Amino acid sequence: MESDRTICKVTVYIPTYNYGRYLAQAVNSVLAQTLDDWELIVINDGSTDNTPEVLDAYRDNPRIRIIDQANKGLNVTNNIALRLARGEYITRLDGDDYMDENLLMILSGALDTKPDIGLVYPDYYHVDEDGEIIEIVRREKIDDEAQLLDLPAHGACTMFRKDLLREIGGYIEDFTCQDGYELWLRFIRKYKPFNVNLPLFYYRRHGSNLTEDTARILDTRRDIKARFVEAYHKDSKPRVLGVILASARSVCPEMHPMAELNDRPLIWYTLSQALEAESLDRVVLSSEDDRTLEYAKQFEKIEAIKRPDELTGVTVRTCDIVKSIIDELQGTGDFSPDAVAILYANTPLRKAYHIDKAVNTMMIFDVDSVISIQEELAPCYQHREFGLTPVNDVAGSLRIERKALYKENGAVYLTKVEAIKSGNLLGRTVGHITMLPEESIKINSGFDFWLVQRIMEQWPGQNQNP
């Protein structure tokens, strides 16, 4: 039964499925809060382990409501908790995580004192299966350090004004993961987020974590963005020109557009995916190589444009090549794009959906550019006065404050025409799409070429041969 009666400051709810090993620590972390004005809802989502026995110890606590249900999944369970919540604010704690004792006090205090914000979230710790701290994950401070809100709050331990969360319709139940990402996009359309730079919950990393399945996460985010664009931006789609850059002038023969890769020319992989991309209104191939141009003409919807001599040198800027193509198309009055998707021929593992995802990202966050990236998790260094200095990590430290580091993979550069015409490949605001390591190989050597071959032949889901 849905309840609108507010009886406390904060509703905490714990959805749990087969987390009996960790569940007592999660519940006890709520009982230990320095803020006393809370209620706790624990929803056992059809667990088959010892979860019911663990919960037996709390069934007589008047501040804890325990619900046992057949397995319904996370987002359905989130909405059940939202309907039952009687607090002014609401936050989720996953059954394998636990809170700092001050989390409720600090987050609810932010909502109390900042009436213009609708949600608030903290930094957090990564801990291992035994609760030992691995690292501190720091988030950039909204407004002070982050103006572009394309990195969502964590799905857990983000505190919402309950009425606002209900107002936007709660959670979309079609998606089985990435509930926080989908909700973030809808929420920030109407309400302002806020964050506090204190680590206030402990996010456990173990083999059964939902977030370990990176491919599933990225696929779901792609679907979320597509649905969001269809719902809120379908009438404002930009005209996008796809520009495929294919140069035969390289010291590496494997980079030649016509190099044979698994019985197809290297250029085929980019041409075929560009034609499949729903977001590209027109596709042009630019090359100085006659053989490549003739091959591209076999594709009915590909326009092959020979690059003039003055734009064929190795020092020529990509921006100048693309600008000349735009000027040529606009000069004929044939096509005037709003944005350009630059696709290099030596990134053959890029798929059509990566291009579409980049365009959707540009629309959702209204950025000048979007690039494809791969997150770099290994420690990185710069050479400074006294040698190598860590950029994103400190080797061997347990008290590391890690910030994500990203490296471009060259698969997609999407930029508004205004930036190109001003002489910049990237505009002032730059969004991103994340690609998997097995999608991100850029052929610059014989080894890269060999690796791409092996991935295409052997990696699950990556075979691009017809």
Image (tube, rainbow, N blue to C red):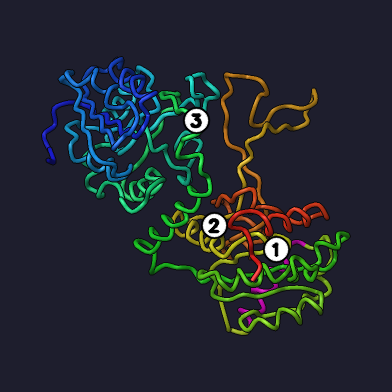
Q: Are marks 1 and 2 in contact (CB under 8 Å)?
A: no
Cα separation between marks 3 and 2 = 38 Å
Label 2 residue SS: loop
Tell me: residue 184, above or below residue 93: below
Q: Mark 3 or mark 1, which is nearer the start of the sequence? A: 3
- Please check the rendered image and state whether residue 320 is part of the magenta-colored stretch, yes or no: yes
Q: Amino acid at mark 3?
A: His
**Mark 1 crowd level (few <14, some 14–19, many ≥20, 10 Å Cα):** many
The answer to whether residue 429 is visible is: no
Q: Quadrant of the C terminus?
A: bottom right
Magenta part of the chain: 317-331
- Pick whichever, 19 or 246, lies toward us: 19
Please count the marks in the image.
3
Identify the residue position indicated by label 3 in the image. Answer: 206
- Please check the rendered image and state whether residue 361 is part of the magenta-colored stretch, yes or no: no
Residue at 76 percent of width and 79 percent of height? 293
Q: Are marks 3 and 2 in contact (CB under 8 Å)?
A: no
The answer to whether residue 264 is visible is: yes
Identify the residue position indicated by label 1 in the image. Answer: 344
Q: Amino acid at mark 1?
A: Tyr
Residue at 81 percent of width and 75 percent of height? 289
- Pick whichever, 341 or 127, lies toward us: 127
Identify the residue position indicated by label 2 in the image. Answer: 368
Tell me: residue 238, above or below residue 50: below
Label 1 residue SS: strand
Residue at 51 percent of width and 69 percent of height? 279
**Mark 3 crowd level (few <14, some 14–19, many ≥20, 10 Å Cα):** some
Query: In this rendering, which labeled residue sits more in front, label 1 or label 3?
Result: 3
